[in-house]
Image (cartoon, rainbow, N blue to C red):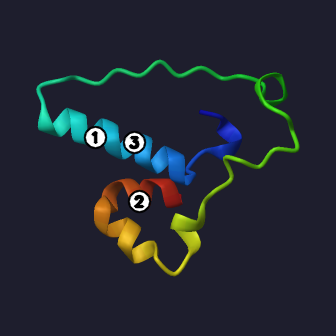
């Protein structure tokens, strides 16, 4: 996960999956975040993670419906 792509559609699915695991099981989720320099892990010209159509597009109602609390946090 890279800071420059924070909140993209891939993050939505990751967070939603973790929230589902936590609510459907007795698992307690722990994450180990670390900050990297983007140019060390990926080419600066790649835009593969900049997919935020779910936050701005016409179908954002559908995305909000899947997890409104998570959606609102990512919009900020």
Position in image of residue 68 (x %, y %):
32, 62
On screen, residue 52 versus residue 28, left or right, reads right
Instruction: Tell me the SS state at disc 2.
Output: helix
Q: Earlier in the sequence, mark 1 or mark 2?
A: 1
Disc 1 to disc 3, C-alpha distance: 6 Å
Q: Identify the mark nearer the N-term, 3 or 2.
A: 3
In the rendered structure, the answer to whether residue 24 lies left or right of residue 74 reads: left
Per the image, label 1 sits on a secondary structure element best described as helix
Q: Residue at x 21, y 33 (%)?
A: 22
Q: Please state the horizontal and vertical placement of residue 43, each as a whole percent of the image.
A: 85, 34
- Residue with the mark numbered 2: 71
Write the residue at 59% across / 66% down: 53
Compared to residue 42, the image places residue 6 above or below, namely below
Q: Identify residue for label 3.
A: 15
61, above or below 1, in the image = below
Q: CA distance from mark 3 to mark 2?
A: 10 Å
For marks 1 and 2, give the CA distance.
13 Å
> Residue 10: which disc?
none
């Amino acid at each position: 996960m890279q800071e420059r792509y924070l909140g993209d559609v891939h993050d939505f699915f990751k967070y939603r999956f973790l929230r589902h695991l936590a609510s459907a099981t007795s698992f307690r989720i722990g994450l180990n975040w670390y900050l990297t320099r983007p140019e060390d892990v990926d080419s600066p010209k790649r835009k593969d993670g900049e997919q935020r159509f779910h936050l701005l597009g016409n179908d954002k109602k559908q995305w909000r419906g899947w997890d409104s609390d998570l959606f609102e946090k990512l919009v900020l």
